[in-house]
Image: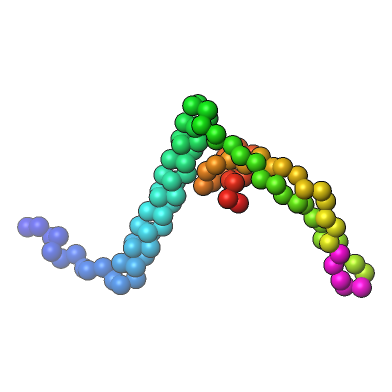
Amino acid sequence: MDDRHLRPGRTGREIIKRALQRTFIGAVLSVSALYACDYLALRFRIATNRNPYGTVRMQPYYAVPQKNGNTEFLFDDPQDVTCVHSLFPHGSDDPCWY
């Protein structure tokens, strides 16, 4: 005789736990696949010389706290920073949209 029909049903907590686990695993796999596709697209642009890098003009500044509680901002000269045309940072370069 088969005893599968005697197995008790799952509780609501078990169902929610399994659904959350599947959602988390799906999100991690989706982000991983998106990063891999972004990396492959960047490597393709590098291999075919299709403008994979860009520059962004950035003006660095320093926030210096004063003894009286105020903050003084010291602005440095604008600098050109190399960036990569992608969704995610690759290597030591940030994406240009960032």
Question: From the viewer's perspective, is residue 68 above or below residue 77?
Answer: below
Would residue 3 be found to the left or right of residue 68 on screen?
left
Task: Provide residue 94's location: percent of width, then percent of height.
Answer: 62, 45
Q: Residue furthest right?
A: 67
Task: Provide residue 89's location: percent of width, then percent of height.
Answer: 57, 44
Give the total of numbered labels: 0
Would residue 67 be found to the left or right of residue 9 on screen?
right
**Per the image, is 12 magenta?**
no
Q: Which residues are magenta?
A: 68-72
Quadrant the N terminus occupies: bottom left
Would residue 50 be found to the left or right of residue 80 on screen?
left
Question: From the viewer's perspective, is residue 97 above or below residue 64?
Answer: above
Q: Please identify the quarter of the rendering in which residue 33 is found.
A: top left
Task: Provide residue 82's location: percent of width, then percent of height.
Answer: 66, 40
Question: From the viewer's perspective, is residue 12 above or below residue 58?
Answer: below
Q: Image point 33% across, 63% down: which residue?
A: 19
Colouring chosen for the image of the structure: rainbow
Q: Image point 46% across, 35% down: which residue?
A: 40
- Closer to the camera in the image, 24 or 80: 80
- Closer to the camera in the image, 17 or 37: 37
Q: Residue furthest left?
A: 1
Q: Image point 19% across, 64% down: which residue?
A: 7
**Per the image, is 70 magenta?**
yes
Task: Provide residue 29's location: percent of width, then percent of height.
Answer: 40, 48
Q: Image point 47% across, 31% down: which residue?
A: 44
Q: What predominant SS class does the magenta segment belong to? A: loop
Would residue 56 be found to the left or right of residue 16 on screen?
right
